[in-house]
Each structure stands twice: as structure tokens, then as C-alpha cells.
Amino acid sequence: MQMKFPMRWLFFFSLFTWMWAQDGKALFQANCASCHAVNRRVVGPALKGAHERWGNDEAEMVKFIQNSQAYINGNFKNTAYAKKLYEEYNKAVMTAFTGLSEAEIRAILGYIKAETEALAAAAKPAGEASTSAGAVSGGGADISPILWVLVLALGAIAVALLVATLALARLLRPEVDLARPSAWDKLRKALASRTFIGLAALLGFLWLSSATVKKARKVGLHQGYQPVQPVAFSHKTHAGEYKIACQYCHIGVEKGKSATIPSTNICMNCHTYIQEGSRYGTKEIAKILASYESGKPIEWVRVHNLPDLVYFNHAQHVRVGGIACQTCHGPVEEMEEVYQYSDLSMGWCINCHRQTKVDLTANPYYARLHEQLKEKEVTVEQLGGLECSKCHY
């Protein structure tokens, strides 16, 4: 039996809605599954019952997931609980998901809630489980509304209104020549044609493919990440106003792999005499003095962090290559609080190696090499800067 046209629209709308409902699971697998599971503890706590523990306040949960350190060090509704959780798990810093939108995080939370309810239903007797399972499967209201789902819903409503309007018009108007097709018949034939359905399917596939690639390219990137630090240190004041060189505080930048975080002793070189700041008075400098007197180092939050599979040597770039700090870290002398300026992706590094010209007059090794080369300009790429083993173990 052939499916009626309005039923076709209802079927396709239901299918698209079901497909989007799986997105919460896909987002969870891509961003959360390495550290969390719903029904057991992994690196972080089991997420079953997370909504109840957060007072069913998804808005607060979204803030925490987007930047856990800012939430812990801020003054939010559930900051006390977040700090307790942070202490319980040995102060392990949760990744900041600044690249996820609020709608995507709510989709993940919807998946967690549905899984929690499914686990609860499975634990009940058979009679109760069937009722609970029905409630879970019908709980579409718990799934966070996504923009394109709303668009489809509004489109379905518009089509339904159009159908109703045309049907009423046909009932109220006088008889017409039956041999002449009505506007509704023409529209229905066009929408039901293989050409229209194929075009709609193609556009949907291209949109989903584009969205998938866009999201995949952002995995592990934290451009714009700006955690709250234990001391309100202003690079604008120190590096900008007072012209303190980066190498004075980050002493490892010309000597080794890491630039290093300055110790309290370095701070005390100046703040033994300067104990009142121009911006925060004595409040922030008092924290430095307390660290120095107690011998307990300040627990700075790392901003720039490459994956473990990447090898990067600061001395090679700064000392040998003569690369300025601002090339990678942006105009730090203008930043009140430092944030990740560049995305630090593989493509970003490769483009730099392709474009950066090597100063062949900087030392005798390059001077001898220059005599053997015909090119007037040599880039890092020509010296092996794109070989996989240069950056990956």
C-alpha cells in the first residue's frame, strides 16, 4: 500500500529527529568517553545521577563543563560542590571544552540523563522496567533542542498549515473543472518527485558531512582558552608597561624544551621591594609573599599544552631560529590575563615551517651550508621541517 503524502513528511521528520538524538551519544564518545563512563568510575567520576548531584540545574553544569577551573575559582551556584569534586579526584584538571556550544553540551547531558534512566529501569522488576523503558523512549522533551531540528519542526508545521488551508479552500470553493489539476496537486507532485527527494537528501548529506568535518578538526584544540590563575598577574603591566623581557621570568625558553613557569624566587627579585601594585594594591602581591614565606609554590594553571605525541623545543625555535614569543603566543604585552592566542594545530605549525625563512648568516654552520645551496632564500621546509620525525617520536 502506498504511503500518503502527509505521512511521508511525518516519517522523514521523525527519522531526522531520531538521527539528531544520537548526536548526544556521538558527542559524548568524542569528547568525554576517554575519562568518563555513565555507570562506572574511570579517570573521573561515574556520570550516572549527575543531574541530581547538580540539583538538576543544567545551566550550571554547562558552565562547569566549558571551563571547570574558572567555575572552581569563581563564585557560582555550585562552586562549593565543584571544589569538593576537584579535591576528591586529586586536583586533576578537567579539559576545558570551549569549542563546544551550549546546545552541544546540553545534548551530551541529555544522553547522560537518558542512560541514567535506562540503567534505573534495567534494575527494576520486569513489570516496572517495561513502564520505565516506555517513559525513556518517549522522553523526547529531555533532548536539548538543536537549531536545525527546530527548523525542521517549523517546516513541518508550515507544511501542515498549508495542507489544511488548501483542503479548506477546496471544500469552500465552487466546483471546478476536474480535468484541470489544482495548485495543491501540482505542489504535491513536485514534492513527491524523485528529483526533489534526491536533491533534499543530497543537501542533507553535504550539510552533515561539512558539520562532521568541522567538528573533527576542532578536537583537541583550545584556542581562546583563558583559565583563572591563583594570582592575578598582568602581562600588560609587566611585559608591556615595564618592558620586562619574557626570558627574565621564563628562564628555560633559550635553554631547553620548556620555557618553564617562574618560581616565587624570581618574583621576589622585584617584590622584595615592591609590595603594592598599581592595579590590585597589596592583595595579589601578598599571595606571592605568603608563598615565599611558607615555601609552598604557587599552583599556576597551564594555558598552552600540546598533546603528548608532539615534541616541541623552545630553545630550538627561540635561540637557534630567532622566533619571537609573540609569533606563537600573540601580543602578550597587551594581555591583562594570558590566553591561548593561536590554535597550535598541526596545520598551523606546517604553514609556519613552509613560510619561515632561515637566517643563513646567523652561525658558521649555516654559513657553510649556504655555500652549497643555489637558492637565495631557504625555508624551514627545505631543511627537513616537514619530516614527521622532527615533531613526532
Image (cartoon, helix red, strand yellow):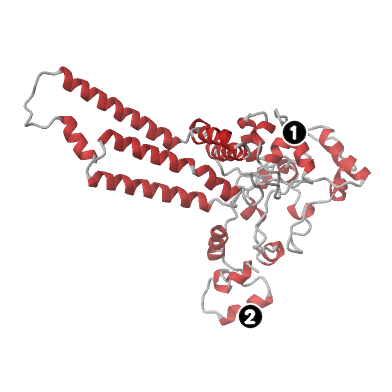
Q: Amino acid at mark 2?
A: Arg
Q: Secondary structure at mark 2?
A: helix
317 shown above or below 43: below
Residue 281 visible in the current orientation = yes
Q: Is residue 303 left or right of residue 343?
A: right
In this rendering, which labeled residue sits more in front, label 2 or label 1? 1
Labelled disc at residue 368 = 2
Q: Secondary structure at mark 1?
A: helix
| Spot occupied by residue 45 in the image (x, y as percentages of width and height) | 71, 44
- At 59% from the left edge and 78% from the top edge, which residue is drawn? 370
- Badges 2 and 1: C-beta atoms under 8 Å apart? no
| Spot occupied by residue 166 in the image (x, y as percentages of width and height) | 21, 25
359 shown above or below 54: below
Residue occupied by mark 1: 81
Closer to the camera, 148 or 186? 186
Q: Amino acid at mark 1?
A: Tyr
Q: Earlier in the sequence, mark 2 or mark 1?
A: 1
Closer to the camera, 257 or 16? 16
| Spot occupied by residue 280 in the image (x, y as percentages of width and height) | 79, 32
Residue 336 visible in the current orientation = no
90 shown above or below 84: below
- At 63% from the left edge and 67% from the top edge, which residue is drawn? 392
- At 58% from the left edge and 33% from the top edge, which residue is drawn? 128
Q: Is residue 316 left or right of residue 149?
A: right
- At 57% from the left edge and 49% from the top edge, which residue is drawn? 29
Image quadrant occupied by the C terminus: bottom right
> Residue 8 falls in which quadrant of the image?
top left
Looking at the image, the residue that sits furthest to the right is: 293
